[in-house]
Image (cartoon, grey):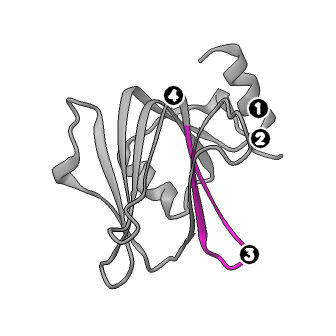
Amino acid sequence: MDETVHKKLLGWGYDPERIQIGSHADICTISQGYLNGVFLFNGKVVARSNARSNLVAVLDDAYLMVSSKHDEKKLVLMEISPLEKRFHEEGIRLHGLHASDNRYIDPIRTSQHLGTFCLVVEDVRKNNIATLEFWTKGEMLYVPKLRIE
């Protein structure tokens, strides 16, 4: 990781000194709002919304970040964005994910050899909310929040 990335992560309250290797299962966990950190990887994400709106968004960058947080209603906001944002709202955001929404890694669209996996988000009635295809180049890194002591 180069020095500018290290400084940016520190400035946002993350601890690059405690970096760990992440996996696609960790992306599923962060989409539920359970991990207090950020994933950093080189690659591409293709996001598809439910079948009715048929929206597609693609992000491709050397440093993509995946993070999540809870809002005031205890719903999860998941965000995928480039480390070097050109404007504040750049990226893919999933607002209002409920605890009852099902999130899983689709085994049919997962390939360790190709570095691909697919996170599917469905509501409680099994209606598709979003599909996120991750195409990674190299390792996925998990960077935890700084510990305040």
Cα distance in 3D space between marks 4 and 1: 20 Å
Precedes in sequence: disc 1 or disc 3: 1
Precedes in sequence: disc 4 or disc 1: 1
Q: How far across and down, in percent of the image, does residue 55 sit?
A: 42, 58
Q: Is residue 85 above or below residue 149?
A: above
Determine which residue is flagged by label 2: 13
Precedes in sequence: disc 4 or disc 2: 2
Q: Is residue 68 magenta?
A: yes
Residue 61 numbered tag: 4
Q: Which residues are magenta?
A: 65-80
Q: Secondary structure at mark 1?
A: helix
- Which residue is pictured at 57% across the width and 31% down the height? 19
Q: Is residue 16 left or right of residue 58?
A: right
Q: Pick the residue in front: 116 or 85.
A: 85
Determine which residue is flagged by label 3: 72
Q: Secondary structure at mark 4?
A: strand
Cα distance in 3D space between marks 1 and 3: 26 Å
